[in-house]
Amino acid sequence: MNDLIEKLNWRYAAKRLNGEIVPKEKLNTILEAIKLSPSSGGLQPYNVIIISDKATKEEIFKTAAPQPQIPDASHLLVFAAWEKITSEQVTEYMNLIAKTRGVSLESLAQFQNSIHGGILSRSEEVNFNWAARQAYIALGHAVVAAATEGIDATPMEGFNAPKLDEILGLTEKGLRSVVIMTLGYRDNENDRLAGAKKVRRANEDIFISI
């Protein structure tokens, strides 16, 4: 079996974690995978908040996301989309491209204009929903990267986003939380589904070839 597929078969959205800390090098691999994930136009319109502080995790558990994985997680990742896409952010991105690739800003004018005529011409809510979808792409990369490192990753949507934003001060940063994910190690003794077989629809029920 392909090594990646073997890791994905092992992967499980753990319902209970044992509190063990994820080594820094493994966490960094997951974060690097997030950074390298694709996004529309390459803009990466989101931030990821990395929470290891025990008190913060407890507060989130008590008031925003009462799910047992959170206090026992090694780290909690909060994927937060940009609330607005601004011309300043686009200019900053153009400067980064020019610096990274050693090209002039003038050579990027057509690309910049296409973003202004496309993304920046849309409503703020449309752009926020678009940014949230880009964050989900990054989440997918994080889930796969965690599996390759033997780390349990549990994505979650069932949380009070406004309360979480308040706890983390995200509104002041122009961010809104859209999805969260715990990292850690499954508690085999207290997680009754940890050893259960993975249930997935058959290939012929999922894939449509044309």
Image: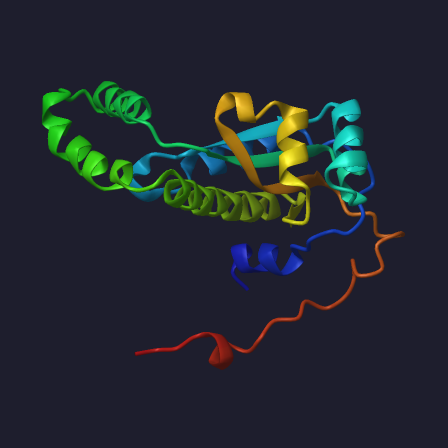
Q: Nearer the viewer, residue 51 or 183?
A: 51
Where residue 64 appears, x then y in whole percent? 73, 37
Q: Residue at x 28, y 27 (%)?
A: 90
The furthest residue to the bottom: 204
Q: How was this image coloured? A: rainbow
Residue 197, placed above or below residue 82 = below
| Residue 189 shown left or right of residue 150 in the figure | right
| Residue 153 shown left or right of residue 69 in the figure | left
Q: Residue at x 42, y 44 (%)?
A: 134
Q: Residue at x 19, y 31 (%)?
A: 112
Where residue 96 appears, x then y in whole percent? 28, 21
Residue 36, placed above or below residue 105 = below
Quadrant of res 78: top right
Q: Residue at x 83, y 41 (%)?
A: 18
Where residue 196 appears, x then y in whole percent? 77, 66
| Residue 31 shown left or right of residue 74 in the figure | left
Q: Nearer the viewer, residue 51 or 2?
A: 51
The count of marks equals 0
Work out which quarter of the rendered image holds the N terminus and state it. Answer: bottom right
Q: Nearer the viewer, residue 42 or 90?
A: 90
The furthest residue to the right: 189
Work out which quarter of the rendered image holds the C terminus and state it. Answer: bottom left
Where residue 178 appears, x then y in whole percent? 55, 42
